[in-house]
Image: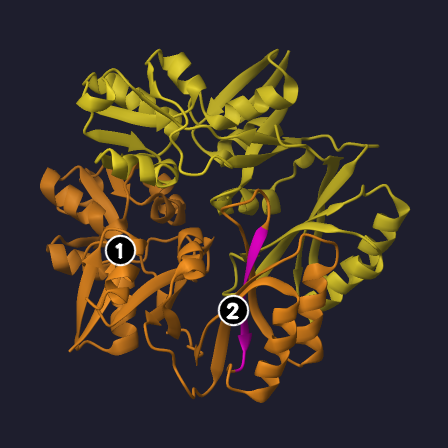
Chain colours: A orange, B yellow
Amino acid sequence: MKNVSFQGEHGAYSESAARVFFGKDITTKPYPTFKEALESTIDGTSDYAVLPVENSIEGSVGESYDLLYSTSLFAIGEVYKKIEHCLIGTGELSSIDTVYSHPQALGQCRKFLQDNKLKTVPTYDTAGSVKIIKDMGKDSVACIASKSASEIYQIKIIKEGIADNPNNYTRFLVLSKKETQEVKNAKTSIIFSIKHEPGALFRIIEKFHTSGINLTKIESRPKKDSIWEYNFFVDFEGSKSDSKVSDALKKIKEETLFFKILGSYTAASLN
Amino acid sequence: MKNVSFQGEHGAYSESAARVFFGKDITTKPYPTFKEALESTIDGTSDYAVLPVENSIEGSVGESYDLLYSTSLFAIGEVYKKIEHCLIGTGELSSIDTVYSHPQALGQCRKFLQDNKLKTVPTYDTAGSVKIIKDMGKDSVACIASKSASEIYQIKIIKEGIADNPNNYTRFLVLSKKETQEVKNAKTSIIFSIKHEPGALFRIIEKFHTSGINLTKIESRPKKDSIWEYNFFVDFEGSKSDSKVSDALKKIKEETLFFKILGSYTAASLN
């Protein structure tokens, strides 16, 4: 059976994403941090790690991008997971005065919380907030987390679908020590840094454009070792094994200071 | 005296940034959220709001960018504030076993915490963590926050400069109801969205390039109302009142679905 590492407590959205990608028949391994989840795949404790990289409302997960820059793992898949926040607790909506959850989840349910005049307490992760309110054992507190977290900790769902915006998806990358070879309907992720001079980024985007390669995402992240210089994280359509792509990447690499192909993988659809 | 709004408790890095920009002689007004800080400037309770937009280690502050998209305020200035994390508490380094702070601050001091085998508890903001440990009144707990937070809550600094990377700066925008007119050494911030079609972003970056305008930052953020479509936040050198800039922006606007000039302001230097 495949072992798949994720960050968070059992019931985390990352764990559900792993099951969407691999199916039910896997062993999931929770780790307190993204870094430890990836390290467990590097040292062979697990076969894969599932890492959230972007949310349709909140945007990119900066810490994940920094780990992708330094990791020796390859991206071998992507998966979208719909985020469906539930109000979870032992009481009823009328008995609750305080709601615990991660600040992002609280923010995504702001309207519901205001309409019901509920106070909020920020916590470190959503599934962890179910643990907290279970330990408190009071009908006046509830938390916001996934349906699956409610099942795991056996605390009932008071209300489903409490997010302001139902279009709430997180994109995850699946990482492994082994690269993919041939993939269909491929996307490729690369990371590079460029000289700090006018037109440097333009010349690279121009090379993608003239090679007929469509970018699906461009993200800049500050470099850790120098102030206000950036690494770029670019996703595009096509596989590194396509000659059109490999020819373009050869030219692009010449314009960069740092260049790394994270991997090619089958593009996922929303589900 | 000028009233300046910021998010957080007194002693927050945002409050220090306001004093770097305006000098000591201002009245600072703390608000629990970024949104409330901006609203207080819109309704006239304050004259300005100071908003963190980017950190040299952690990257962009997503929530701030979303507020810039929807706000009626203008960017009239920018300021860089060096982030200098201190270990603050009533005990000594040898008596401490647990450290409270915002997850970003804990992450930025990871090496120090590991070397000293300290457990961590995440909190919602750095200055707020000083309040928490003051209320606890135990020599075994400490927190990570600014020197100024230590002074305000009168809890001593146990150790200064505990961050892994000393190149830690946050960039803030200063917002106001009134636009700037003529500014020297100007930078301009704009926000736009484009059609979801190949080459759309390329055509815009090309127009900046052929107009001889240097981009200093490009950031994409998901749109809230549709999945995986993006707004772009672009900073560049020059003022909206320069004819070179205004001519280029006229052409760029034609390629966009949404277009907004946030403001022109004097470029700040690191200090």
Q: Chain of mark 1?
A: A
Q: Quadrant of the C terminus of chain A?
A: bottom left
Disc 1 marks a residue whose amino acid type is Glu
**What element does badge 1 sit on?**
helix
The verdict on residue A236 being magenta is yes
Residue positioned 35% across, 65% down in the render: A82
Q: Chain of mark 2?
A: A
Disc 2 marks a residue whose amino acid type is Ile
Q: Which residue is mark 1?
A: A36
Residue positioned 77% across, 32% down in the render: B180
Residue that protrudes farthest toward the right in the picture: B243
Q: Nearer the viewer, residue B19 or A261?
A: A261
**How far across and down, in percent of the image, does residue B118 sit?**
22, 34
Q: Which residue is mark 2?
A: A190
Along the polypeptide, which appears first: circle 1 or circle 2? 1
Q: Nearer the viewer, residue A208 or B198?
A: A208
**How far across and down, in percent of the image, does residue A161 sit?**
32, 58
Q: Is residue B195 above or below residue A127?
A: below
Q: Which residues are magenta?
A: A230-238
Tell me: A226 left or right of A204.
Answer: left
Can you see residue B198? no
